[in-house]
Amino acid sequence: MLKLKELIGEEGIYVVMGVIAFLFTIGCILFSLKACAETLLPICPQAIDECGNPTYARVTATAYTSRVQETDDTPYITATGDRVRKGYIGVSRSLEEKFPMKTIVYCRMSDGTIVMFRVMDRMSARWTDERIDVWHEELKDAEEFGVQRGYLWSE
Protein backbone atom coordinates (compact mmCIF):
# COMPACT_ATOMS: atom_id res chain seq x y z
CA MET A 1 0.00 0.00 0.00
CA LEU A 2 2.87 2.32 0.81
CA LYS A 3 4.40 1.91 -2.68
CA LEU A 4 1.03 2.59 -4.30
CA LYS A 5 0.65 5.71 -2.18
CA GLU A 6 4.08 6.87 -3.30
CA LEU A 7 3.19 6.22 -6.97
CA ILE A 8 -0.21 7.90 -7.18
CA GLY A 9 -0.38 10.04 -4.08
CA GLU A 10 -3.02 10.21 -1.38
CA GLU A 11 -5.66 11.72 -3.68
CA GLY A 12 -5.02 8.92 -6.19
CA ILE A 13 -5.74 6.33 -3.50
CA TYR A 14 -9.12 7.95 -2.88
CA VAL A 15 -9.87 8.02 -6.60
CA VAL A 16 -9.02 4.32 -6.97
CA MET A 17 -11.17 3.44 -3.94
CA GLY A 18 -14.03 5.50 -5.37
CA VAL A 19 -13.79 3.75 -8.74
CA ILE A 20 -13.79 0.33 -7.04
CA ALA A 21 -16.85 1.29 -4.97
CA PHE A 22 -18.61 2.60 -8.08
CA LEU A 23 -17.92 -0.59 -10.06
CA PHE A 24 -19.09 -2.73 -7.14
CA THR A 25 -22.33 -0.74 -6.94
CA ILE A 26 -22.95 -1.10 -10.70
CA GLY A 27 -22.29 -4.85 -10.43
CA CYS A 28 -24.83 -5.16 -7.60
CA ILE A 29 -27.44 -3.24 -9.58
CA LEU A 30 -26.94 -5.41 -12.69
CA PHE A 31 -27.12 -8.58 -10.62
CA SER A 32 -30.36 -7.39 -9.00
CA LEU A 33 -31.91 -6.56 -12.38
CA LYS A 34 -31.00 -10.00 -13.73
CA ALA A 35 -32.39 -11.70 -10.62
CA CYS A 36 -35.66 -9.79 -10.97
CA ALA A 37 -35.91 -10.04 -14.77
CA GLU A 38 -39.10 -12.07 -14.75
CA THR A 39 -40.89 -9.36 -12.80
CA LEU A 40 -39.76 -6.75 -15.34
CA LEU A 41 -41.52 -8.30 -18.32
CA PRO A 42 -42.92 -5.82 -20.81
CA ILE A 43 -46.65 -5.17 -20.60
CA CYS A 44 -48.79 -7.35 -22.84
CA PRO A 45 -51.94 -6.14 -24.57
CA GLN A 46 -54.92 -6.20 -22.26
CA ALA A 47 -57.01 -8.45 -24.51
CA ILE A 48 -60.47 -9.45 -23.31
CA ASP A 49 -63.00 -11.89 -24.70
CA GLU A 50 -66.69 -11.21 -25.46
CA CYS A 51 -67.56 -11.80 -21.77
CA GLY A 52 -64.98 -9.32 -20.56
CA ASN A 53 -62.56 -11.98 -19.30
CA PRO A 54 -58.86 -11.44 -19.95
CA THR A 55 -57.41 -13.61 -22.71
CA TYR A 56 -53.80 -13.31 -21.69
CA ALA A 57 -51.64 -15.17 -19.23
CA ARG A 58 -48.20 -14.92 -17.72
CA VAL A 59 -46.55 -18.18 -18.69
CA THR A 60 -43.45 -20.28 -18.35
CA ALA A 61 -42.26 -21.31 -21.82
CA THR A 62 -40.32 -24.53 -22.23
CA ALA A 63 -39.27 -26.48 -25.30
CA TYR A 64 -39.73 -30.06 -26.45
CA THR A 65 -38.90 -32.34 -29.36
CA SER A 66 -40.55 -35.45 -30.77
CA ARG A 67 -38.32 -37.80 -28.82
CA VAL A 68 -40.27 -40.67 -27.23
CA GLN A 69 -38.92 -39.80 -23.76
CA GLU A 70 -40.58 -36.36 -24.05
CA THR A 71 -43.92 -37.35 -25.56
CA ASP A 72 -46.49 -40.16 -25.64
CA ASP A 73 -46.38 -43.12 -28.03
CA THR A 74 -47.20 -40.91 -31.03
CA PRO A 75 -44.38 -38.34 -30.86
CA TYR A 76 -45.07 -36.70 -34.23
CA ILE A 77 -48.85 -36.34 -33.82
CA THR A 78 -50.37 -33.48 -31.80
CA ALA A 79 -53.52 -33.60 -29.68
CA THR A 80 -55.44 -32.19 -32.66
CA GLY A 81 -54.31 -35.12 -34.83
CA ASP A 82 -52.01 -32.96 -36.95
CA ARG A 83 -48.34 -33.65 -37.57
CA VAL A 84 -45.98 -31.45 -35.50
CA ARG A 85 -44.33 -28.48 -37.19
CA LYS A 86 -42.50 -25.28 -36.38
CA GLY A 87 -44.71 -22.74 -34.61
CA TYR A 88 -46.85 -25.34 -32.82
CA ILE A 89 -47.12 -25.32 -29.06
CA GLY A 90 -48.68 -27.42 -26.38
CA VAL A 91 -50.44 -25.73 -23.48
CA SER A 92 -50.97 -26.87 -19.92
CA ARG A 93 -54.50 -27.89 -19.09
CA SER A 94 -54.94 -24.74 -16.99
CA LEU A 95 -54.50 -22.68 -20.19
CA GLU A 96 -56.70 -24.76 -22.47
CA GLU A 97 -59.89 -22.91 -21.52
CA LYS A 98 -58.39 -19.51 -22.42
CA PHE A 99 -56.54 -20.81 -25.48
CA PRO A 100 -58.40 -23.77 -27.06
CA MET A 101 -56.83 -26.03 -29.67
CA LYS A 102 -56.01 -24.37 -33.02
CA THR A 103 -56.03 -20.86 -31.50
CA ILE A 104 -53.39 -18.49 -32.83
CA VAL A 105 -51.56 -16.91 -29.89
CA TYR A 106 -48.76 -14.42 -29.41
CA CYS A 107 -46.08 -14.63 -26.76
CA ARG A 108 -43.96 -11.71 -25.61
CA MET A 109 -40.81 -13.23 -24.14
CA SER A 110 -38.85 -11.66 -21.31
CA ASP A 111 -36.34 -10.27 -23.84
CA GLY A 112 -39.18 -8.33 -25.50
CA THR A 113 -39.49 -10.43 -28.68
CA ILE A 114 -42.99 -11.36 -29.81
CA VAL A 115 -43.56 -14.77 -31.39
CA MET A 116 -46.73 -16.12 -33.01
CA PHE A 117 -47.74 -19.74 -32.27
CA ARG A 118 -50.67 -22.05 -32.89
CA VAL A 119 -52.01 -24.13 -30.00
CA MET A 120 -52.02 -27.68 -31.34
CA ASP A 121 -51.01 -29.87 -28.41
CA ARG A 122 -51.73 -30.52 -24.77
CA MET A 123 -49.07 -30.91 -22.14
CA SER A 124 -48.92 -33.71 -19.61
CA ALA A 125 -51.35 -33.39 -16.68
CA ARG A 126 -48.38 -33.12 -14.31
CA TRP A 127 -47.91 -29.50 -15.42
CA THR A 128 -50.50 -27.62 -13.38
CA ASP A 129 -49.14 -24.08 -13.75
CA GLU A 130 -49.68 -21.79 -16.74
CA ARG A 131 -47.11 -23.20 -19.13
CA ILE A 132 -46.51 -23.57 -22.84
CA ASP A 133 -44.25 -26.09 -24.55
CA VAL A 134 -42.75 -24.96 -27.88
CA TRP A 135 -42.01 -27.76 -30.38
CA HIS A 136 -38.51 -27.89 -31.92
CA GLU A 137 -37.28 -30.28 -34.57
CA GLU A 138 -33.76 -30.55 -33.12
CA LEU A 139 -32.79 -31.26 -29.51
CA LYS A 140 -30.01 -28.65 -29.61
CA ASP A 141 -32.56 -25.98 -30.57
CA ALA A 142 -34.86 -27.01 -27.73
CA GLU A 143 -31.96 -26.92 -25.28
CA GLU A 144 -30.95 -23.49 -26.55
CA PHE A 145 -34.53 -22.24 -26.06
CA GLY A 146 -34.39 -23.44 -22.45
CA VAL A 147 -36.94 -22.07 -20.00
CA GLN A 148 -38.28 -18.56 -20.46
CA ARG A 149 -41.01 -16.38 -18.98
CA GLY A 150 -43.48 -14.43 -21.03
CA TYR A 151 -47.00 -13.18 -21.66
CA LEU A 152 -49.36 -15.14 -23.89
CA TRP A 153 -52.44 -13.63 -25.53
CA SER A 154 -54.83 -14.16 -28.41
CA GLU A 155 -56.89 -11.75 -30.45
Image (cartoon, rainbow, N blue to C red):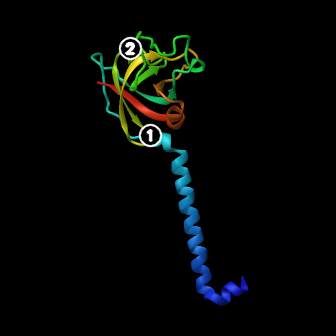
**How far from the left and from the top, in percent, is residue 80?**
41, 10
Nearer to the camera, 135 or 104: 135
Q: Quadrant of residue 86?
A: top left
Residue 32: which numbered mark, if any? none
Q: Quadrant of the N terminus?
A: bottom right
Going by the numbered disc 2, the residue's amino acid type is Met
What SS does tag 1 mark?
loop
**How far from the left and from the top, in percent, is residue 31?**
56, 52
Taking the spot 56% from the left edge, 62% from the top edge, the residue there is: 25
Going by the numbered disc 1, the residue's amino acid type is Ser
Q: Residues within 10 Å of mark 2 (few under 14, many from 20)?
A: some
Taking the spot 47% from the left edge, 27% from the top edge, the residue there is: 137
What SS does tag 2 mark?
loop
Nearer to the camera, 23 or 137: 137
Write down the residue under mark 1. Answer: 110
Write down the residue under mark 2. Answer: 101
CA gap between label 1 and label 2 equals 24 Å
Q: Quadrant of the C terminus?
A: top left
CB within 8 Å, label 1 to label 2:
no
Q: Quadrant of residue 44?
A: top left
Taking the spot 41% from the left edge, 9% from the top edge, the residue there is: 81
**How far from the left and from the top, in percent, is residue 60?**
49, 30
Q: Quadrant of residue 58?
A: top left
Q: Residues within 10 Å of mark 1 (few under 14, many from 20)?
A: some
Residue most extreme to the front = 138
Identify whether 96 is placed above or below 31.
Answer: above
Taking the spot 41% from the left edge, 15% from the top edge, the residue there is: 83
Nearer to the camera, 84 or 100: 84
